[in-house]
Image: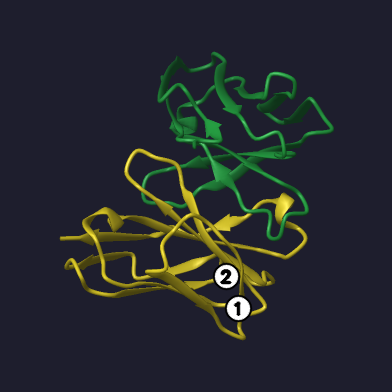
Chain colours: A green, B yellow
Amino acid sequence: DQQVKQNSPSLSVQEGRISILNCDYTNSMFDYFLWYKKYPAEGPTFLISISSIKDKNEDGRFTVFLNKSAKHLSLHIVPSQPGDSAVYFCAASVTGAAGNKLTFGGGTRVLVKP
Amino acid sequence: DAGVTQSPTHLIKTRGQQVTLRCSPKSGHDTVSWYQQALGQGPQFIFQYYEEEERQRGNFPDRFSGHQFPNYSSELNVNALLLGDSALYLCASSLSGAENYGYTFGSGTRLTVV
């Protein structure tokens, strides 16, 4: 039972353009969502998050949108840079549940072409 | 400020053997979570330790066990290794109650079972 899904395994985008990564979830108990970025041979690094009480959160070039009714979130990267080439994971948690464990999607590999 | 440290970085074991992986959390963090990331998939939650107790457990068999020490460091033990246990094992640390500020992940231990 995959509660968090990233249906696009890969994405290729030109430098300077927008990258849009999508994530769907099925568990309505999830109320906190995070995006992590992973380079090869490194652990995932926290990128940006959003609480279910919001529908948008912005941090520099990164914006996360949440559509609770559709159980869908997306990450926008504008403008995309070659250093953004990595695997991006969407994750979700239930606030207040002991430890707030993360449930991850399968990841989207992003390639930004110069 | 050291982040999360995991050892060893790589390990090759034979089916049926036992393995112990180690994790030192980020300074100031008191909670350690372990994740298994199979090739091409997102990390899957194994369990979490807080105050030297297992606080939460994912859908993993009893062959997977852990421990947390008074200095918050942690070990993951896997008994009777199967080929399917080959994966990247990630340790993540956090401060209890502040998980929504983002977990800090280590670079992982790559386990290969032959």
Q: Tell me which residue sits at (62%, 80%) in the image.
A: B52
What chain does mark 1 sit on? B
B91 and A58: which one is in front?
A: B91
Amino acid type for the residue under numbered disc 2: Pro
| Quarter location, residue B64 | bottom left
Tell me which residue sits at (71%, 23%) in the image. A65
State the quadrant of the C terminus of chain A: top left
Q: Is residue A45 left or right of residue A107?
A: right
How many angstroms separate mark 2 from mark 1 (CA)?
Answer: 7 Å
Say few, some or many: other residues with alpha carbon within 10 Å of mark 2 (under 14 / 14 to 19 / 20 or more). many
| Label 2 with label 1: CB-CB less than 8 Å | yes
Q: Quadrant of residue B109?
A: bottom left
Answer left or right for A114 relative to A88: left
Q: Could you say where residue B27 lies in the image, as x and y percent from the top left?
A: 64, 72
Residue B50 x/y as whole percent: 65, 72
Above or below, A94 relative to A66: below
For residue B45, side relative to residue A35 (left or right): left
Viewer-proximal residue among A87 and A7:
A7
Q: Which residue corresponds to the image point at 71% horizontal and 65% vertical from the top-left? A: B95
What residue is rendered at 53% in x and 63% in y?
B47
Q: Return the disc, 2 or 1, that comes first in the chain's sequence.
A: 2
Say which element carries label 1.
loop
Regarding residue B1, the answer to whether it shows in the image is: no
Q: Residue furthest bottom?
A: B70
Residue B1 vertical position relative to residue A94 in the rendered view, above or below: below
Kindly identify which residue carries mark 1.
B72
The amino acid on which the numbered mark 1 sits, given as a three-letter code, is Tyr
Residue at image mark 2? B25
Badge 2: chain ID: B
